[in-house]
Image: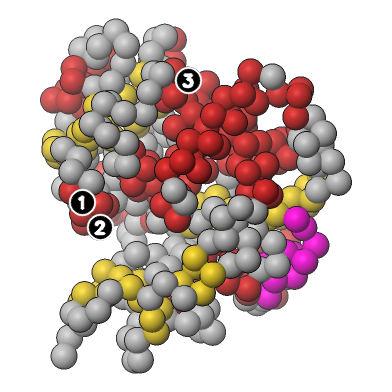
């Protein structure tokens, strides 16, 4: 077992549900009176390392730290850092973690935040690792639901779009499956359906879920419609992306079939999956959701810096001669990482990206 001496936010499910609830209720308190926290991080420095484009996540983290009285350093384009000279993830994050008190990282590869946490000298927050997870967006979504719906349980949630590659969807499903009575309607094409490992988590928590291929079939049953963009950058060919890109578009006509207390969320950016006409519908809450993201990130920074939950990073074991079959897994790019897997026998799970590997004998 490898345990960090810090509280790292890599995967929400590394923490007990009580921890998430505390962050969400602190986020709600901050949203009501942000000025009370204006000096809570005086003297602290946060680094933001963004290896992938971002508007909301990066800027909401930066403003969160500035509103807490702290300061920020970092890059949003690895081409302007030594990464462009070939520096590996370990060296960059090791060095920056010696300069900062807390580090927020977004990366193109799955499992990268965990990899960084193995050697970093400050807590790491995962701001999105490839198509894998996005825990701080999920805390944003939980705060939005608790403020706007008043509950996190007994909800019927429709998730629409790129359920295969959408890391916000993966983290949200994992989280909402831990609250009782939640049901999921998964709206996607067959090609972009939810990965098996997430469906297994829903099953393991006894959550009902159905898969459909149109918004019309689902919308009248929903408390929440969570729209997502088709993740162009995760496709192996542009031809495949072109086939998927215009399949879903939420418009006024479809909204007519939704309940009066339906809420429509979207982690943003939107491409064309929500028509602009929907923005004026009072049930469209995605802009408000983005603002909650700033408050919840203030709560995340404060809670992580308390350092009450040392994170277990590797709990499985290194399997001789076996490597992860996911080519976007960080363990296949950074050669020094221990290739560690959970489970035994024929099915192993990569500890960085959760990919399942069938071992052939
Ligand atoms: C999402 C992301 O980066 O995964 N955006 C965000 O952080 N709010 C969603 C997306 O890019 O589609």
Query: Looking at the image, which residue is at 21% across and 75% down?
Result: 347
Q: Position of residue 282 (x, y in %)?
A: 42, 9
Magenta residues, start to end:
91-101
Q: Nearer the viewer, residue 206 or 261?
A: 206
Compared to residue 250, the image places residue 312 above or below, namely: below
- Compared across the picture, whether 81 is left or right of 125 comes to right
Q: Tell me the residue that label 1 is attached to.
A: 204
Q: Which marked residue is nearer to the observer: mark 1 or mark 2?
A: 1
- Compared across the picture, whether 108 is left or right of 70 comes to left
Q: Earlier in the sequence, mark 3 or mark 1?
A: 3
Residue 147 badge: 3
Q: Position of residue 323 (x, y in %)?
A: 35, 82
- Compared across the picture, whether 99 is left or right of 61 comes to right
Q: Tell me the residue that label 2 is attached to.
A: 197
Give the quadrant of the C terminus.
bottom left
Query: Looking at the image, which residue is at 68% across and 49% down?
Result: 305
Mark 3 is surrounded, within 10 Å at the Cα level, by few (under 14), some (14 to 19) or many (20 or more) other residues, namely some
Residue 271 badge: none
Q: Which marked residue is nearer to the observer: mark 3 or mark 2?
A: 3
Quick one: which residue is furthest to the right in this view?
43
Magenta segment includes 307: no
Image quadrant of residue 339? bottom left
Q: Earlier in the sequence, mark 3 or mark 2?
A: 3
Mark 1 is surrounded, within 10 Å at the Cα level, by few (under 14), some (14 to 19) or many (20 or more) other residues, namely few
Image quadrant of residue 7? bottom right
Q: Nearer the viewer, residue 33 or 137?
A: 33
Compared to residue 71, the image places residue 257 above or below, namely: above
Q: Is mark 3 in CB contact (under 8 Å) with mark 2?
A: no
Secondary element type, mark 3: helix
Magenta segment includes 96: yes
Q: Position of residue 152 (x, y in %)?
A: 36, 28
Secondary element type, mark 1: helix
């Amino acid at each position: 077992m490898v345990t960090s001496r810090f509280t790292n936010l890599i995967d929400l499910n590394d923490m007990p549900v009580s921890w998430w609830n505390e962050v969400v209720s602190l986020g709600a308190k901050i949203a009501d009176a942000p000025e009370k926290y204006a000096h809570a991080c005086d003297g602290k420095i946060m680094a933001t390392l963004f290896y992938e484009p971002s508007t909301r996540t990066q800027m909401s983290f930066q403003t969160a730290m500035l509103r807490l009285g702290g300061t920020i350093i970092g890059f949003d384009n690895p081409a302007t850092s030594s990464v462009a000279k070939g520096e590996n993830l370990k060296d960059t994050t090791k060095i920056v973690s010696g300069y900062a008190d807390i580090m927020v990282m977004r990366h193109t590869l799955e499992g990268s935040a965990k990899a960084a946490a193995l050697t970093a000298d400050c807590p790491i927050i995962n701001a999105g690792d490839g198509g894998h997870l996005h825990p701080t967006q999920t805390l944003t979504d939980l705060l939005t639901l608790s403020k706007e719906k008043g509950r996190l349980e007994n909800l019927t949630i429709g998730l629409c779009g790129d359920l295969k590659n959408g890391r916000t969807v993966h983290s949200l499903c994992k989280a909402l499956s831990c609250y009782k009575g939640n049901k999921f309607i998964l709206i996607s094409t067959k090609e972009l359906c939810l990965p098996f490992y997430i469906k297994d988590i829903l099953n393991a928590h006894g959550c009902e879920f159905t898969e459909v291929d149109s918004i019309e079939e689902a919308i009248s049953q929903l408390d929440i419609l969570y729209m997502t963009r088709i993740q162009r950058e995760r496709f192996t060919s542009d031809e495949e992306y072109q086939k998927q890109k215009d399949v879903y578009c939420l418009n006024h006509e479809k909204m007519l079939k939704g309940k009066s207390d339906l809420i429509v969320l979207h982690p943003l950016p939107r491409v064309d999956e929500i028509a602009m006409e929907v923005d004026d519908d009072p049930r469209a809450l995605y802009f408000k959701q983005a603002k909650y993201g700033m408050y919840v990130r203030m709560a995340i920074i404060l809670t992580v810096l308390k350092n009450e939950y040392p994170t277990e990073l590797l709990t499985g074991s290194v399997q001789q001669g076996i490597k992860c079959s996911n080519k976007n897994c960080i363990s296949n790019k950074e050669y020094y990482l221990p290739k560690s897997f959970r489970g035994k026998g024929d099915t192993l799970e990569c500890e960085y990206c959760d990919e399942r590997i069938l071992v052939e004998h």
